[in-house]
Image (cartoon, rainbow, N blue to C red):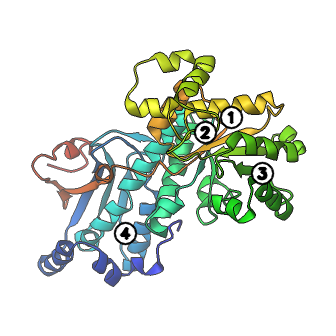
Amino acid sequence: MDTLVADDLVRSETIAAYTDTYFNKTKQIVSRFGDKTVTYAVFLRRPVISAPKLMLDWILEVAAARKTVFDIEVLHAEGEWVGAGEPLLYISGSYVHLTDLETLILQKLGSVCVAAHHAYQMCIALPEVTFLAMEARHCAGTEMQAMMSYGAAVGSRAAQREGAKGFIGNANDATAHFFGAPRGLGTMPHALIGYAGSTLRAAEMYRETFPKDPLTVLVDYFGREITDGLEVCRRFPDLAAEGRLSVRLDTHGGRFLETLDPATSYAVLERHDPVAIRRYRSDAELRHLVGTGVSAAAIWRMREALDEAGFPKVRIVASSGFGVDKCRVMADAKAPIDIVGTGSFIPDHWHETYATADIIAYDGEARVKLGREFLLQRRNGSAKG
């Protein structure tokens, strides 16, 4: 089982504690008046990428623990696009054994599918850029961490089938297997630079401790992205020449990258992609292009400085709020990003993640809540009316 959920989440008493009370009461009523075989249709109200494996692994473990069998018909394979309102899957079995599982089924499905869709969109927007999943610190616990990481991996694979480079890994060991990696990726946090006293010394410490690793250095700690970045390049010219040295831009949103201001940011884009800046833009798009923080202008300016100093093979890692919209703006500005580190595939409008399950058949007889008849139409006549 790929989840990080405690083993006792398959125990009936634990499920009863976490499910909605009306399902527990329903279980008692059905047990008293007679069980039926029911069929649930599970869907979301927005387009998503199908990512059901974590939920399916769990429900099959529950079935085994209860010595029952659930017939599960997955309508959209992992990584497939699913339209709004389209059932992702049908689950059939004993109503007594299924009714108390509905709450947890929905928990384990909706947000994962939305995260997968976001990751897919990000990768498609920047198909030549590789991504690193950095969602863990933004998750509310280890189960959410596993769910979001798995969602990113599913969305990435869907984009890779369309030619995108996608996610090459993530930032922790526990969920690295979702990306086919033995362990997490990453080099240093800002705090190590504070500890070392300088960006260069932090890079030296890292190199001395991990001499065989490629080196990615945060360069915004002291607000000297260009100065400190070039100092590190000059200290490690072999790594720079081999393409094994990267500078990571994570400039605070309250200031501009070193040497930039509003006017010079516009000038940078005029040099490299004047059409991008001349189109009509929303305020948010303008901030991504020429504003403070890690803007398209900041990335272009860093690339200019590296190339002018003779370090064309040093790569640029960009982070800080790289969600779907920011990735699209960066693509439009042809920002020279090599790697994006992001956890912004985590759903930001949580109400969009709510999955829904409706019973559409009782002992083979079609019956569903008024207004949800569309779920019957997608059953291809398998429920008898």
User: In the image, what residue type sits under mark 4?
Assistant: Val
Q: Residue 69, which numbered label? A: 4
Q: Secondary structure at mark 2?
A: loop
Residue visible at 60% across and 34% down in the picture: 298
Q: Residues within 10 Å of mark 2 (few under 14, many from 20)?
A: many
Q: CA distance from mark 4 to mark 2?
A: 59 Å
Of labels 4 and 3, the one closer to you: 3
In this orientation, which residue lies closer to the viewer: 257 or 148?
257
Q: Residue 302, which numbered label? A: 1
Q: Which residue is mark 2?
A: 257
Q: Residue 161 appears at what percent x and percent y?
A: 57, 36
Q: Residues within 10 Å of mark 4 (few under 14, many from 20)?
A: some
Q: Residue 310 appears at what percent x and percent y?
A: 84, 31
- Decide which of tag 4 and tag 2 comes sooner along the chain: 4
In this orientation, which residue lies closer to the viewer: 48 or 86?
48
- Decide which of tag 4 and tag 3 comes sooner along the chain: 4
User: In the image, what residue type sits under mark 3?
Assistant: Leu
